Amino acid sequence: MKISEIAERTGLSISTIRFYEKSGLCPRIKRGPDGKRQFSSADTDWLVLLASLRTTGMPISRMRAFAGLYASADDTIPERRTALLAHRQSLEDRQAELDQCRTILDLKLLRYDEPMKDLT
Amino acid sequence: MKISEIAERTGLSISTIRFYEKSGLCPRIKRGPDGKRQFSSADTDWLVLLASLRTTGMPISRMRAFAGLYASADDTIPERRTALLAHRQSLEDRQAELDQCRTILDLKLLRYDEPMKDLT
DNA sequence: TGCTTGACCTAAAGTTGCTTCAGGCAGGTA
DNA sequence: TACCTGCCTGAAGCAACTTTAGGTCAAGCA
């Protein structure tokens, strides 16, 4: 598959995909004889996972470490699992934080809906 | 109040607060004769709101526009309300997106918890 | 009294995670 | 043939901060 298709499927932009490759997040994507990237379906799956990790706030540096685990032997599986679990937790924290902010916004909005008084 | 207290109360870092002021997000914070910032409780409230907006993804440029509305006359109240409502919606979208990512992570984690098979 | 420490100040440079731009090649089409 | 289109690269630009360098001033203390 070509890069534009992958962008479509993963929701990442073409330049983000190139940037991720250059950053060492997805090692050895094949190239055709014309120099163009050729994505396998495993590449796609991996990029979908990367996109989820990134969207949920994992920094590139940790993603790179995570990619390193995947690139090495199966004995890193427990580590991969631990990393994902830790990240899942931080995601939940983040979600709690957003809920809290939503409450603040809602309170603010309530004051607009009340018959005018003391609108800061 | 001094800047370190405000940082504590709002969860923003001291340099972020200075940065926000320089970016025109909180106009005219008073200064003491020594040149130090003096925060009123209104300033604190405003920064708490800014922090919520920022945490939930509002870009600085839009926050500046929003601050502009607050700085001007009361007839911008409907606009302020509209802006907050729109942002509330985008926050919900974001939350839905995070939920979706969490599902992806959970699926991935499930595969680690199953008796080993095909761990990509 | 002199000296250090700590909290504040500014301006400027650095960091992260992208996006945009400039310039280039290869293949298809009017 | 000229022109698109889609890909490529490297470099510059941008957002939102953080860090650094250098400076002021009051408080504490030997």
Image: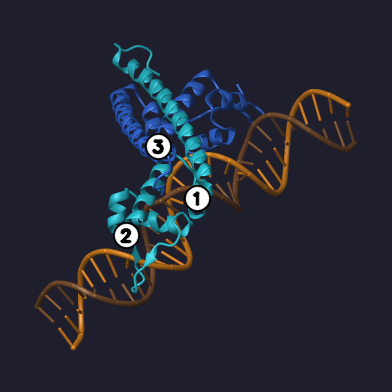
Chain colours: A blue, B cyan, C orange, D brown
Amino acid type at mark 2: Ile
Q: Do marks 2 and 1 share a subunit? A: yes
Q: What is the number of the mark on residue A47? A: none
Residue at left offset 60%, top offset 21%: A1
Chain at numbered mark 1? B
In the structure shown, which secondary structural element does the residue marked by tag 3 occupy? helix
Amino acid type at mark 3: Leu
In the structure shown, which secondary structural element does the residue marked by tag 1 occupy? helix
Quick check: A107 above or below D21?
A: above
Q: Is residue D8 left or right of residue B99?
A: right
Q: Which residue is mark 3?
A: A110
Camera sees residue B61: no
Residue B89 horizontal/vertical position (percent): 48, 32
Residue C15 horizontal/vertical position (percent): 43, 50
Amino acid type at mark 1: Asp
Camera sees residue A13: yes
Mark 1 surroundings: few (<14), some (14-19) or many (≥20) residues within 10 A:
few
Chain at numbered mark 2? B
Hey, which quadrant is residue A63 in on the image?
top left
Hey, which quadrant is residue B41 in on the image?
bottom left
- Sequence-first tag of 2 and 1: 2
Q: Which residue is mark 1?
A: B74
Closer to the camera in the image, B64 or C12: B64
Q: Is residue D2 left or right of residue B104?
A: right
Distance (Cα) linking label 3 and label 1:
17 Å
Closer to the camera in the image, A1 or B20: B20
Residue B46 horizontal/vertical position (percent): 39, 51
Q: Which residue is mark 2?
A: B3
In the structure shown, which secondary structural element does the residue marked by tag 2 occupy? helix
Distance (Cα) linking label 2 and label 1:
29 Å
